[in-house]
Image (spheres, helix red, strand yellow):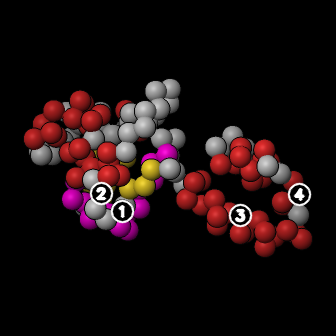
């Protein structure tokens, strides 16, 4: 149970459990990887972006408090070219530009979910 908890917090990797790598557990290993896929694909902030669901509307860019602090013109709905923002729409899809500017990023780790709340397509998930 401890190993499973550490898997969820990314303190260990599946490969750190040698018995799981044995051929007789191949099906279990594949199932575990599929089950953990959403968590393993998330960034350090727990934010995951699904580019297939993103329409590039930019709602998340405009409402992100860290973005507005980095470039106040974003709060007025204007595009940014700054590399100091968390999120930016590029080629019609949201991109995470500077993850460490996110309010969820350690060591602060605030429980900010604004980008997820304003994403009407569900392209942004916070775990």
Task: Label 1: state its secondary structure.
Answer: loop
Label 3 CA crowd tier, 10 Å (few <14, some 14–19, many 20+): few
Task: Label 2: state its secondary structure.
Answer: loop
Q: Distance between the residues labelled 4 and 2?
A: 41 Å
Q: How many marks?
A: 4
Disc on the earlier residue, 2 or 3: 3
Whether residues under marks 2 and 1 lie with C-beta atoms below 8 angstroms apart, the answer is yes
| Residue 105 x, y percent position in the rendering | 46, 34
Q: Does the magenta stretch include residue 100?
A: no
Circle nearer the viewer, 4 or 2: 2
Q: Is 71 located above or below residue 88 in the figure?
A: above
Disc on the earlier residue, 3 or 1: 3
Task: Label 3: state its secondary structure.
Answer: helix
Point 12% across, 36% down: residue: 73
Q: Is residue 102 visible?
A: yes
Task: Label 4: state its secondary structure.
Answer: helix
Whether residues under marks 3 and 4 lie with C-beta atoms below 8 angstroms apart, the answer is no
Q: How far apart are marks 2 and 1 (CA)?
A: 6 Å
Q: Can residue 95 be seen in this view?
A: no
Q: Name the residue under label 3.
A: 32
Q: How far apart are marks 2 and 3 (CA)?
A: 29 Å
| Residue 50 x, y percent position in the rendering | 41, 61
Circle nearer the viewer, 4 or 1: 1
Q: Name the residue under label 2.
A: 119
């Amino acid at each position: 149970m401890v190993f499973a908890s550490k898997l969820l917090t990314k303190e260990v990797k599946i490969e750190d459990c040698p018995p799981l790598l044995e051929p007789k557990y191949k099906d279990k290993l594949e199932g575990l990887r599929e089950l953990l896929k959403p968590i393993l694909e998330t960034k350090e902030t727990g934010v995951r972006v699904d580019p297939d669901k993103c329409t590039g509307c930019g709602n998340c860019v405009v409402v992100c408090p860290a973005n507005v602090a980095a470039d106040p013109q974003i709060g007025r709905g204007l595009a940014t070219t700054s590399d100091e923002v968390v999120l930016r729409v590029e080629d019609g899809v949201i991109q995470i530009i500077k993850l460490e500017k996110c309010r969820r990023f350690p060591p602060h780790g605030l429980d900010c979910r604004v980008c997820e709340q304003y994403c009407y397509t569900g392209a942004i998930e916070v775990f």
